[in-house]
Image: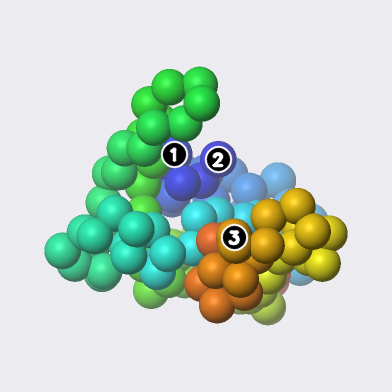
Protein backbone atom coordinates (compact mmCIF):
# COMPACT_ATOMS: atom_id res chain seq x y z
CA UNK A 1 0.00 0.00 0.00
CA UNK A 2 2.97 2.34 0.37
CA UNK A 3 3.05 3.17 -3.33
CA UNK A 4 -0.41 4.76 -2.95
CA UNK A 5 0.95 7.28 -0.44
CA UNK A 6 2.66 10.50 -1.51
CA UNK A 7 4.32 10.86 1.90
CA UNK A 8 5.62 7.66 3.50
CA UNK A 9 6.59 9.26 6.81
CA UNK A 10 3.26 8.99 8.72
CA UNK A 11 2.90 5.29 7.86
CA UNK A 12 6.55 4.47 8.52
CA UNK A 13 6.50 6.31 11.86
CA UNK A 14 3.44 4.30 12.87
CA UNK A 15 5.10 1.03 11.83
CA UNK A 16 8.11 2.08 13.91
CA UNK A 17 5.88 2.92 16.91
CA UNK A 18 4.06 -0.44 16.98
CA UNK A 19 7.04 -2.70 16.29
CA UNK A 20 9.01 -4.23 19.15
CA UNK A 21 12.61 -3.19 19.64
CA UNK A 22 14.61 -4.44 16.63
CA UNK A 23 11.31 -5.42 14.94
CA UNK A 24 11.21 -6.12 11.23
CA UNK A 25 9.22 -4.35 8.53
CA UNK A 26 8.88 -6.26 5.25
CA UNK A 27 7.14 -4.76 2.25
CA UNK A 28 7.07 -4.92 -1.52
CA UNK A 29 6.49 -2.13 -3.96
CA UNK A 30 6.75 -1.44 -7.66
CA UNK A 31 10.33 -1.48 -8.82
CA UNK A 32 11.18 2.19 -9.38
CA UNK A 33 13.36 1.61 -12.41
CA UNK A 34 10.73 -0.49 -14.18
CA UNK A 35 8.05 2.15 -13.65
CA UNK A 36 10.45 4.91 -14.70
CA UNK A 37 11.10 3.09 -17.98
CA UNK A 38 7.51 2.00 -18.59
CA UNK A 39 5.93 5.41 -17.93
CA UNK A 40 8.87 7.30 -19.46
CA UNK A 41 8.94 9.94 -16.76
CA UNK A 42 11.50 12.66 -17.22
CA UNK A 43 13.34 12.43 -13.90
CA UNK A 44 14.13 9.09 -12.24
CA UNK A 45 14.89 10.88 -8.95
CA UNK A 46 11.49 12.60 -8.73
CA UNK A 47 8.49 11.22 -6.84
CA UNK A 48 5.87 10.96 -9.57
CA UNK A 49 2.13 10.40 -9.42
CA UNK A 50 1.43 7.87 -12.16
CA UNK A 51 -1.84 6.60 -13.60
CA UNK A 52 -2.29 3.17 -15.12
CA UNK A 53 -5.25 1.31 -16.60
CA UNK A 54 -5.99 -2.00 -14.89
CA UNK A 55 -8.84 -4.46 -15.36
CA UNK A 56 -10.74 -2.70 -12.56
CA UNK A 57 -10.20 0.77 -13.99
CA UNK A 58 -7.70 3.58 -13.61
CA UNK A 59 -5.25 3.31 -10.72
CA UNK A 60 -3.05 6.11 -9.41
CA UNK A 61 0.13 5.45 -7.46
CA UNK A 62 3.44 7.11 -6.65
CA UNK A 63 6.76 6.04 -8.11
CA UNK A 64 9.74 7.00 -6.02
CA UNK A 65 13.43 6.30 -6.52
CA UNK A 66 15.29 3.88 -4.31
CA UNK A 67 17.11 6.86 -2.78
CA UNK A 68 13.82 8.33 -1.55
CA UNK A 69 12.67 4.95 -0.18
CA UNK A 70 15.89 4.45 1.78
CA UNK A 71 15.86 8.06 3.05
CA UNK A 72 12.27 7.72 4.27
CA UNK A 73 13.08 4.48 6.06
CA UNK A 74 16.12 6.03 7.74
CA UNK A 75 14.22 9.15 8.85
CA UNK A 76 11.50 6.93 10.35
CA UNK A 77 14.08 4.97 12.37
CA UNK A 78 14.75 1.92 10.19
CA UNK A 79 17.79 0.53 8.45
CA UNK A 80 17.60 -1.66 5.38
CA UNK A 81 18.63 -5.20 6.13
CA UNK A 82 17.99 -6.68 2.68
CA UNK A 83 16.61 -5.76 -0.73
CA UNK A 84 15.35 -8.34 -3.22
CA UNK A 85 14.44 -7.96 -6.87
CA UNK A 86 12.40 -11.14 -7.38
CA UNK A 87 12.54 -12.94 -10.69
CA UNK A 88 9.73 -15.08 -12.08
CA UNK A 89 9.52 -18.79 -11.32
CA UNK A 90 9.71 -21.72 -13.70
CA UNK A 91 5.95 -22.18 -13.19
CA UNK A 92 5.45 -18.66 -14.53
CA UNK A 93 7.62 -19.52 -17.53
CA UNK A 94 5.22 -22.33 -18.46
CA UNK A 95 2.28 -19.91 -18.27
CA UNK A 96 3.82 -16.91 -20.05
CA UNK A 97 7.24 -17.53 -21.59
CA UNK A 98 7.47 -14.08 -23.19
CA UNK A 99 6.82 -12.22 -19.92
CA UNK A 100 9.16 -14.63 -18.13
CA UNK A 101 12.04 -13.71 -20.45
CA UNK A 102 11.34 -10.00 -20.04
CA UNK A 103 11.15 -10.09 -16.26
CA UNK A 104 14.23 -12.25 -15.87
CA UNK A 105 16.04 -9.11 -17.09
CA UNK A 106 13.74 -6.32 -15.91
CA UNK A 107 12.32 -6.60 -12.37
CA UNK A 108 8.73 -5.58 -11.63
CA UNK A 109 8.89 -5.50 -7.85
CA UNK A 110 11.23 -4.63 -5.06
CA UNK A 111 11.05 -6.37 -1.68
CA UNK A 112 12.58 -4.60 1.32
CA UNK A 113 13.32 -5.97 4.77
CA UNK A 114 14.01 -3.13 7.18
CA UNK A 115 14.90 -3.40 10.86
CA UNK A 116 13.81 -0.99 13.56
CA UNK A 117 16.78 0.83 15.09
CA UNK A 118 16.93 0.51 18.85
| C-alpha distance separating marks 3 and 1 | 25 Å
Instruction: Name the spot of residue 74 as percent of width and height, x first.
Output: 49, 70
Quadrant in the picture for residue 50: top left
Colour scheme used in the picture?
A: rainbow
- Res. 77 visible in picture: no
Q: Are discs 2 and 1 less than 8 Å apart at CB?
A: yes
- Frontmost of labels 3 and 1 is 3
Instruction: Name the spot of residue 84 as percent of width and height, x first.
Output: 66, 73
Instruction: Name the spot of residue 93 as percent of width and height, x first.
Output: 75, 63
Quarter placement of the C terminus: bottom right
For label 2, the residue is 1
Look at the numbered disc 3 and give the secondary structure of its residue: helix
- Res. 83 visible in picture: yes
| C-alpha distance separating marks 3 and 2 | 24 Å
Q: Is residue 104 above or below residue 73?
A: below
Look at the numbered disc 1 and give the secondary structure of its residue: helix
Q: Which mark is residue 4?
A: 1
Label 3 crowd (10 A; few <14 / some 14-19 / many >=20)? few
| C-alpha distance separating marks 2 and 1 | 6 Å
For image coordinates 32% across by 65% down, the residue present is 37
Q: Is residue 4 above or below residue 48?
A: above
Q: Are discs 3 and 2 less than 8 Å apart at CB?
A: no
For label 3, the residue is 99
Q: Nearer the viewer, residue 54 or 46?
A: 54
Label 2 crowd (10 A; few <14 / some 14-19 / many >=20)? few
For image coordinates 38% across by 74% down, the residue present is 67
* Residue at the limit of the structure toward the left, as seen here: 42
Instruction: Name the spot of residue 113 as percent of width and height, x first.
Output: 69, 67
Amino acid sequence: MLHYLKDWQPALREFHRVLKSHGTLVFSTHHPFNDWQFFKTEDYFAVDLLEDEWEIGKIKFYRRPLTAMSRDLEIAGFYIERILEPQPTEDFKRINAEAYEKHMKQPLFLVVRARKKS
